[in-house]
């Protein structure tokens, strides 16, 4: 497993650096363009929507984890089960870093007394380490990304279908994060709970699919 | 686990309804250079993939030193299957860089020789920062050769290593292969379509045809069983009595046949009023696997 983890980590740190770089650029851009004082511009939008942007980025990274990376690792004599567990470790690393980054991002406006902005609610609500919703969504989205990658490698049609499902899952994740941010409306009823259960189910189904598919994977 | 025997027994593999390998048995003995030859679609890459647990099989078993190859890290550490690189992978460009391949090889192969890899990288004039999709076919082959040789794996397999290489590089490859073999004595399996050029390198040849092993024996011993016999039709027919006739080519009353037989029978043919000429490995391969396509 160590070999496969080392192999995946050589790409992971580059990808995580891209996420960190994006966060740094958005924060710096927001700061220099007057967002702390209430300026309305693209940086304010990107800063506030960082949790969603990070989700999209890790989804794309996860896709590659189960296509070219998997193929390369096995072609060099990696074991399938080792790759699966290394993949889990890498997903946890991505989740941990993005979660930590999210906490830092949401702390910036508070620490530096930025002007409060309404649509930063999601960002700000996920600012504590006790907010388990965001890492849960990150894990599910990454598993879904891996599943989409494996499905695409097997069949283009299946890949397109799963990619469409992933888009719906994205929207569901956004709604979940929105509801979890405190903007609860009476009409939602037990929807937040349903969405949490759906997120858990997506994670579980994706993991089973990934496990089974990797174990039967044929190197190209 | 150095110098172990690789053994495949009863291997069957299908892709959908297409059965690619049929109840295949194969033994690879240590310390030899094997040539694996077969026509397009014969199942060479599938077989090599199964031998190294990179491909699944429907039935059968593959062992190395008596241990199953499948998901066995101790065994997989002894093997290197250097595949043909592809410019496209999963409908997209193969954006991995040469340096990523080399770094990955260093991670996975326990005997990886970095100094030798650097030497070959310099000799082949490969740029580590270049993406695989930016390389020519010949350069991709150089990367696979580099990885195979620098892996120092006791069992090293190369799939079409000469594809796209110019004649100078092919000669250099055979030279490097023989140098490495004389130094380390490790086992090589080389799959190729450029048969005659590589024939002198192969100590043993495996001929795969339509998913079955037709031959697995020393190259010289195999080639020595085949002859072309040509002459007047009736004389040739008489001489060929008791020999296995593989192909026939006739122009009016002049007939040429490709035959297989034991040494005594072939020696007898030399005494008749016919021309008897030797075959090379490529001729043997065509005679065995041509199935009339060359007629």
Image: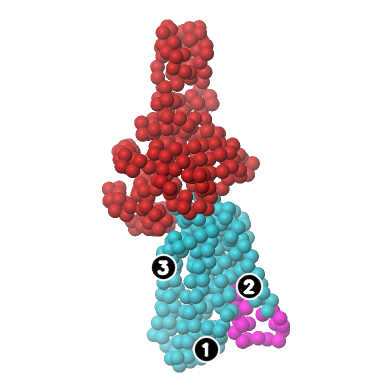
Where does label 2 land, which residue?
A199
Where does label 3 land, which residue?
A14
**Residue A173 magenta:** yes
Mark 3–mark 1 Cα distance, whole angstroms, equals 32 Å
> Which of the numbered marks, if any, corresponds to residue A117?
1
Q: How many marks?
A: 3
Residue beneath the point at 64% across and 41% down: B17
Q: Chain of mark 2?
A: A
Colour applied to chain A: cyan
Q: Earlier in the sequence, mark 3 or mark 1?
A: 3
Q: Is residue A165 visible?
A: no
Range drawn in magenta: A168-192
Colour applied to chain B: red
Residue beneath the point at 68% across and 86% down: A185
Q: Is residue B83 above or below residue A133?
A: above
Labels 3 and 2 positioned on one and the same chain? yes
Q: Nearer the viewer, residue B163 or B260?
A: B260
């Amino acid at each position: 497993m160590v070999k496969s983890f080392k192999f995946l980590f050589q790409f992971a740190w580059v990808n995580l650096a891209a996420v960190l770089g994006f966060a740094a650029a958005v924060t710096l851009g927001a700061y220099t363009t007057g967002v702390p004082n209430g300026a309305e511009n693209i940086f304010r939008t990107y800063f506030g929507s960082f949790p969603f942007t990070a989700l999209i980025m890790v989804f794309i990274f996860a896709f590659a984890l189960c296509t070219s990376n998997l193929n390369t690792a096995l072609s060099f004599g990696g074991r399938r089960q080792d790759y699966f567990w290394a993949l889990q470790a890498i997903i946890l690393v991505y989740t941990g870093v993005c979660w930590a980054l999210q906490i830092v991002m949401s702390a910036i406006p508070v620490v530096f007394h930025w002007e409060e902005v309404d649509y930063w609610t999601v960002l700000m609500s996920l600012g504590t380490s006790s907010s388990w919703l965001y890492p849960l969504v990150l894990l599910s989205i990454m598993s879904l990304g891996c599943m989409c990658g494996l499905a695409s490698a097997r069949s283009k049609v299946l890949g397109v279908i799963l990619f469409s499902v992933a888009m719906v899952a994205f929207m569901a994740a956004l709604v979940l994060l929105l509801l979890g941010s405190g903007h609860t409306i009476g009409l939602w009823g037990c929807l937040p709970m349903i969405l949490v259960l759906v997120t858990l189910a997506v994670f579980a189904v994706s993991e089973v699919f990934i496990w089974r598919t990797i174990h039967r994977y044929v190197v190209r | 686990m150095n110098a172990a025997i690789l053994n495949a027994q009863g291997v069957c593999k299908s892709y959908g309804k297409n059965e690619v390998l049929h109840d295949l048995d194969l033994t690879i003995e240590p310390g030899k250079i094997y040539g694996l030859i077969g026509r397009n679609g014969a199942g060479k890459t599938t077989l090599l993939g199964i031998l190294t647990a990179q491909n699944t099989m429907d039935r059968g078993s593959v062992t190395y030193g008596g241990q199953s190859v499948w998901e066995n890290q101790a065994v997989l550490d002894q093997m290197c299957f250097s595949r043909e690189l592809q410019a496209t992978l999963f409908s997209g460009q193969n954006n991995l860089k040469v340096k990523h391949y080399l770094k990955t090889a260093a991670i996975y192969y326990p005997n990886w020789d970095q100094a030798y890899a650097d030497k070959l990288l310099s000799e082949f004039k490969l740029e580590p920062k270049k993406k695989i999709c930016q390389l020519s076919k010949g350069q991709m082959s150089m990367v696979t050769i580099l990885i195979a040789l620098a892996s120092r794996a006791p069992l090293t397999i190369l799939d079409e290593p000469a594809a796209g290489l110019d004649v100078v590089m092919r000669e250099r490859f055979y030279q490097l292969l023989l140098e490495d073999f004389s130094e380390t004595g490790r086992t090589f399996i080389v799959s190729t379509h450029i048969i005659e050029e590589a024939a002198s390198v192969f100590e043993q040849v495996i001929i795969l045809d339509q998913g079955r092993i037709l031959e697995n024996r020393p190259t010289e011993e195999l080639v020595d069983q085949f002859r072309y016999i040509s002459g007047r039709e009736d004389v040739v027919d008489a001489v060929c009595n008791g020999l296995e006739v593989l192909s026939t080519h006739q122009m009016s009353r002049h007939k040429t046949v490709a035959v297989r037989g034991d040494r005594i029978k072939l020696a007898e043919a030399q005494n008749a009023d016919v021309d008897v000429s030797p075959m090379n490995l490529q001729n043997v391969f065509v005679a065995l696997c041509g199935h009339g396509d060359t007629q």
